[in-house]
Amino acid sequence: MGAYVEDEVPQSFEKHELKIDTNGDEEDNDNPIEEVRLTVPITDDPSLPALTFRTWVLGLISCCLLAFVNQFFGYRQNQLSVTSVSAQILVLPVGKLMAATLRSEPIRVPLTPWSFSMNPGPFNLKEHVLITIFASCGASGVYAVGIVTIVKAFYHRTLHPVAAMLLVQTTQLLGYGWAGLFRKYLVDSPYMWWPANLVQVSLFRALHEEEKRSRGGLTRLQFFMVVFISSFAYYVIPGYLFPSLSALSFICWIWKDSITMQKLGSGQQGLGIGSFGLDWSTVAGFLGTPLATPFFAIANSLVGFFLFLYVFIPIAYWSNLYEAKRFPLFSSHTFDSNGQIYNITRILNNKDFDLDKVGYHNYSKLYLSVLFAFIYGLGFATLTASISHVALFDGKRILEMWKKTTTAAKDQFGDVHTRLMKKNYEAVPQWWFQLILVLTFGLSLFALEGFDKQLQLPWWGLILACAMAFVFTLPVGVIQATTNMQPGLNVITELVIGYMYPGKPLANITFKTYGYISMVQALGFVSDFKLGHYMKVPPKSMFIVQLVGTVVASTVYFGTAWLLLASIDNICETDLLPEGSPWTCPGYDVFYNASIIWGVVGPLRMFTNHGNYPAMNWFFLIGLLAPVPGWLLSRKCPEKKWIRFIHMPMLLGGPLALPSAKAVNYLSWGAVGIFFNYYVFRRYKSWWARHNYILSAALDAGVAFMGVFLYFTLQSYDISGPEWWGLNSSDHCPLAKCPIAPGIVVHGCPVL
């Protein structure tokens, strides 16, 4: 979280690291951030080729593979997010193999004066960085695919493929248009140091430094291959032969006829007491790999999770708060007053696809499970807690850094890294960014106003969304560049458009995507530029790779989603899918219900006196005040360093992956994270430093490749494993979803 910053300008440092770059000039390591001085090299060789044939081939393949795999697993019961680290490690031996085998003679491009070489020399670090940027474009996800999914799979409406494709592309690219305006402050400034990039820098250095295998040991690459092959082979069991291994809930097996015990014991539909999974996708599928999450973050998240799920929710449920007993304990669905799934067709006008107010009045107010309702409350609290926490704990330091940044920009001062970049490489012209902004804004307007206005959002909504994203990009970027925290705009954007333009589900989620994701993409672009800044990669090459990688990744994400939505019967519809089917779309199910809550019904009929949940608005105030006690304690007892590790945004936000993630995901994730990032880190630190991140990447890659292999060789042909008890992907707790209020009739549940 914190950074060590000198009180004076960089020239006053007593200790400077002096190195010589490849041009023979002495360079002074005058970066003001200690972590950067210790991690980032201050040498550069501008003669190294960067945007080579190998970069294009390996980069595009990595981008396409990761985009396909992540979208493919995004629809499955156990999601899996394969990060760019897997590609970062895998492409290294392939790049070296290409350098050793490909011909080096120039190849002329027909009908042009241009030529290129497939092998311009040894595979180098700059090529590796650009390939990893390609891969990160494929691994980062495409938020707008969720809109396509819920329209086709949940609302069962048609969507013009060109409109859908334009939506996907423009929401990913629009933020790039104004990212260039903030380069001077968020990239060139030495005070904006982007802590997360130092992990990548460390891994690049580890992979490219000379390494000899120790006697009886393994190199990092050999260790990766051993774990990858083991993970690949093992996933046949939970992925095909024994899917029940993903969630083992023993309490349900003992008390087969007890609704209460199954609610307590189910890892997928209940509190998950005693539940665990023997499947890496259970561990890392929703919450990300615990091996790459610091222990203090795991601890804060788990404290929030345990307090929420094992203290607050049981009290609220069994005291029947908000008629909770009429509904499941653990569900992301929406319900009517009779405990049935909310029949959205009764309140939607088929022609205009908006709210039928008469139908809504004659039917029922919208109800949520008590867990889902309070997840929204925690979302409100986390947003305001992030603002107050950053202001209290980091505000002074951020303000000091910002003052130094503006002074440095005014005086054109930069540290060693900025000087090297300006001396050795041409900057990206500003008109490149302006051209992207004009083109993507025009295409966005075309997507919204054309195609019979299927996306519902009017032109003024696009302008407002862009204005919100633009205004927040710099302040949120300053926070992220100095604290590694990014306050999200998703709740605010839903709230704003929900009040301004109620009753329009697609307008709501389209506005949210343009307003929220444009900022996220702008900051992702700037963050990658900072990585290239540290690794001394030519800025124009970085720009081209990010632009092409984003377009290619968005196309693959869209194509994969469109293919699966068209080819898998009843995808995402859990009531119609065959028993044990993995295509349950848990993340998109939450996205769909959010579109009902914020778009169709709207916040006016949900979170005011017109609805059932006006008390949720108090969470805005609760979150704003939550960091204050910890801040006061840290000032009163500065010698107690552990107080600063009480991180209220993480604690309040810990449970927010619910109900997409289940209790078994949290418990398995926490157990693995505590073991490796507390026990192993403390007892076997040298092993942890050498193998921890590589272990994570290998486990991810093995599961991903076997999952795709099983689908295309067996599951796509409806060839399932042997029929037996363990073939079901549920945790065998069918009564956990049942209400316990008397008189509520639900299929498959006893009437009480």
Image: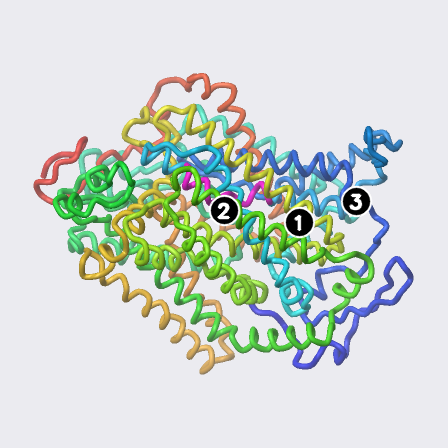
How far across and how far down the image is residue 180, in percent? 63, 58
Vertical position of residue 439 compared to residue 650: above or below: above
Vertical position of residue 119 compared to residue 619: above or below: above
Of helix, strand and loop, which one carries label 2?
helix
In the figure, is residue 611 to the left or right of 529?
Answer: left
Q: Are marks 3 and 2 in contact (CB under 8 Å)?
A: no
User: Is label 2 or label 1 in front?
Assistant: 2
Count residues near mark 2 (Cα–Cα under 10 Å), then give few for <14, some for 14-19, many for 20+: many
Q: Residue under label 1, please give it.
A: 690
Of helix, strand and loop, which one carries label 1?
helix
Q: Residue under label 3, please give it.
A: 124
How far across and how far down the image is residue 191, in percent? 65, 70
Q: Residue under label 2, please give it.
A: 444
Query: Which comes sooner in the sequence, label 3 or label 2?
Result: 3
How far across and how far down the image is residue 69, in percent? 53, 34
Q: CA distance from mark 3 to mark 2?
A: 39 Å
Membership of 542 in magenta stretch = no
Amino acid type, residue under disc 2 in the picture? Ser
Tell me the number on the disc at residue 313: none
Amino acid type, residue under disc 1 in the picture? Arg
Residue 59 visible: yes
